[in-house]
């Protein structure tokens, strides 16, 4: 796990959006990003998954805000409003 990062709809920290659907969890997102060839996966707002190879658009680590439960895994945190829980392949 890389940690919690800032994000915004206007300028994404991770540019590729993976469509996970109702099965949203950190594992489902990292699996989709890995299959698409990306090294980073980020979950946001409980139901969104983004992928990339680096954090873009000057986004940075955030000390709070990654506390929204994942839609399909209530025991996991999937980011929050304008916050990404970021995972790196192999960690």
Image (spheres, grey):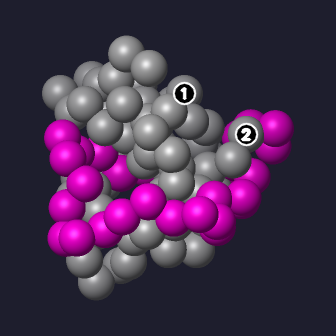
Return the x and y of residue 1 as percentages of the image width and height. 50, 33
Which quadrant is the C terminus positioned in? top left
Q: Is residue 52 magenta?
A: yes
Helix, strand or loop under label 1:
helix
Q: Which residue corresponds to mark 1?
A: 27
Helix, strand or loop under label 2:
strand
Res. 63 image quadrant: bottom right
Q: Is residue 32 visible?
A: no
**Main secondary-structure element of the magenta-colored stretch:** loop
What residue appears at the point 35 percent right and 79 percent down from the top-left corner? 9
**Between disc 1 and disc 2, whose residue precedes?**
1
What residue appears at the point 25 percent right and 77 percent down from the top-left corner? 11
What residue appears at the point 29 percent right and 45 percent down from the top-left corner? 51
Q: Is residue 54 left or right of residue 84?
A: left
Q: Which residue corresponds to mark 2?
A: 76
Q: Which residues are magenta?
A: 48-75
Q: Is residue 35 left or right of residue 79?
A: left
Q: Nearer the viewer, residue 50 or 58?
A: 58
Return the x and y of residue 47 as percentages of the image width and height. 58, 55
Return the x and y of residue 72 as percentages of the image width and height. 71, 41
Outermost residue to the bottom:
10
Q: Is residue 7 left or right of residue 15?
A: right
Q: Determine contact: label 1, label 2, CB under 8 Å.
A: no
Res. 67 image quadrant: bottom right
Dot 2 surroundings within 10 Å: few (below 14), some, or many (20 or more)?
some
Return the x and y of residue 30 as percentages of the image width and height. 42, 30
Q: Nearer the viewer, residue 52 or 60?
A: 60
Dot 1 surroundings within 10 Å: few (below 14), some, or many (20 or more)?
some
What residue appears at the point 36 percent right and 64 percent down from the top-left corner? 60
Q: Is residue 60 magenta?
A: yes
Q: Is residue 52 visible?
A: yes
């Amino acid at each position: 796990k890389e940690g919690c990062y800032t994000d915004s709809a206007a300028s994404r920290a991770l540019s590729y959006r993976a469509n996970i659907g109702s099965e949203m969890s950190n594992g489902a997102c990292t699996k989709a990003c890995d299959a698409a060839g990306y090294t980073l996966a980020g979950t946001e707002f409980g139901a969104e998954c983004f992928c990339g190879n680096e954090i873009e658009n000057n986004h940075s680590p955030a000390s709070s805000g990654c506390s929204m439960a994942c839609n399909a895994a209530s025991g996991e945190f999937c980011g929050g409003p304008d916050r990404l829980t970021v995972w790196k392949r192999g960690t």
